[in-house]
Image (tube, rainbow, N blue to C red):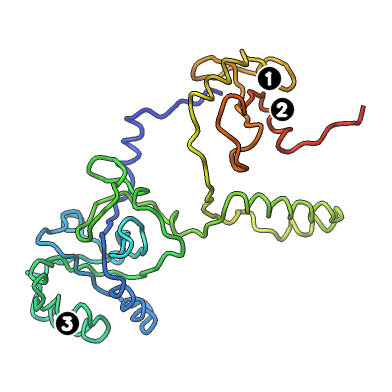
Amino acid sequence: MRIKALSNRDLLQILNEMKGALLINGIYDGVFLEILKAQEQRSGCESFLQPYSRKVIRSLQKHRPSPEDPVRLYASTTANLSQICYVAEIVNWEDKRTLSPERQHAVYQHLSRYQLKEVDLFRGKQEIGIKALNLITIRNLRKLGTLHSTSLLTKVSDHMPLKARTRAGGWSEVYDLGDVIELPSAKREELEADLASQVRDSAGLSDQALQDRLASAPRLPERVQVVSIGFRRNADVIVAVLRRAKGICGKCRMPAPFCRRSDGTPFLEVHHLVSLSHGGEDTVENAAALCPNCHREIHNGEPNNSD
C-alpha cells in the first residue's frame, strides 16, 4: 500500500486544528514555589500570575478560558529561560483595570494569605506593577521532572518553532503539546537493555506461567519519552559510500532488496565499522553499505552453524 506524504497544506490544517496554549517567559521560581505550597495546603486551590506587560494577552481575551475549558500553560523561569520548567492550566483571564471592588478584594485576600510575593505587584506599589495588566488564574501547577527546550513549542502566529529566549518577560501563543512533555523519560539504550533482560527472563518461564502473566498484564503499554544521544552525520560520507557500493551489499554481496520510493535508488544502509558511539570516525574508510538484513545481523546476530 502506498502511503501518501503529508503536504504543507495538510500539515497547516493539522496545526490549525490543534488547541492553543500559552508560554510565559521567565517567571521567578519563588512565585511558583508559593503556588505549589498553597496547592498543598488547599487541594484544588486556584492561584494567580501577573505577567509584566502593558499589553493584553489577546488570545485569552478573545477565547476566555474557564475551569471547564482550560488553556494549557507552559512557563520558563528566570534561571532557565530556554526551558519549559512548569506546566499548569489557565482557568480564567481578567484585565486588572476592569476588576470590580469585590473582585479586587477577593484576589487581594488570596494573595495576602498564599502569594505574598505578588501582593505589591497586584496593588501597583512596584514600579513594574503598573504594567502588569493581565491577571491569570491557574490550577494544577506542576514542576517538570525533566526540563524540555522551549524550541519544542510551535508558534501559532507563523507555525515556526519558538526561538530561544535571552531575557525574561512576555509570552508566546503556541500549540498545545498535550501531556507529552509530562511523561517520564528514559534513555533509548536503557529501555532496550531493560527489554532484552525481561525477554531473557520470560524465555525461562513455562508456557502456563507465561500465559498466566499475559492474562493479568495491562493491554496498553506505559508511555515514556525516549531520550537518546545522536550524531550529526556527514551527508557526503553517506552519498560516497552508497555510490561506491553500486547497489551491492558489502557483506552478502547481493543486490539491494528493493529501491527507495523517494528516488528509485537501491536501498542500502550505511554502517560504521567502528561505531560513532565508540569513537569511530565519520569517514568513507570507516563505513560500508549493507542491506537491512546484514546490517541487523552485524548488530544483533550470531553465525548460523546449523548447516
Is 99 positioned to the left or the right of 47 in the image? left
Nearer-N-terminus badge (1/3): 3
Q: Position of residue 24 (x, y in %)?
A: 26, 60
The quadrant the C terminus occupies is top right
Q: Residue at x 49, y 20 (%)?
A: 262
Q: Which residue is mark 3?
A: 108
Q: Which residue is mark 1?
A: 249
Circles 3 and 2, Cβ within 8 Å, touching? The answer is: no
Give the CA distance from mark 1 to mark 3: 73 Å
Badge 2: how crowded within 10 Å, few (<14), some, or many (20+)? some
Disc 2 marks a residue whose amino acid type is Cys
Q: Position of residue 267 (x, y in %)?
A: 60, 21
Disc 1 marks a residue whose amino acid type is Cys
Q: Is residue 2 above or below residue 94?
A: above
The disc placed on residue 271 is none
In terms of secondary structure, where does tag 3 sit?
helix
Q: Nearer the viewer, residue 167 or 107?
A: 167
Q: Which residue is mark 2?
A: 294
Q: Nearer the viewer, residue 83 or 276?
A: 276
Q: Is residue 202 above or below residue 114?
A: above
Q: Residue at x 35, y 57 (%)?
A: 83
Circles 2 and 1, Cβ within 8 Å, touching? The answer is: yes
Q: Position of residue 102 (x, y in %)?
A: 11, 81
Q: Is residue 189 above or below residue 253?
A: below
The residue mark sitting in front, 3 or 2, is 2
Disc 3 marks a residue whose amino acid type is Tyr
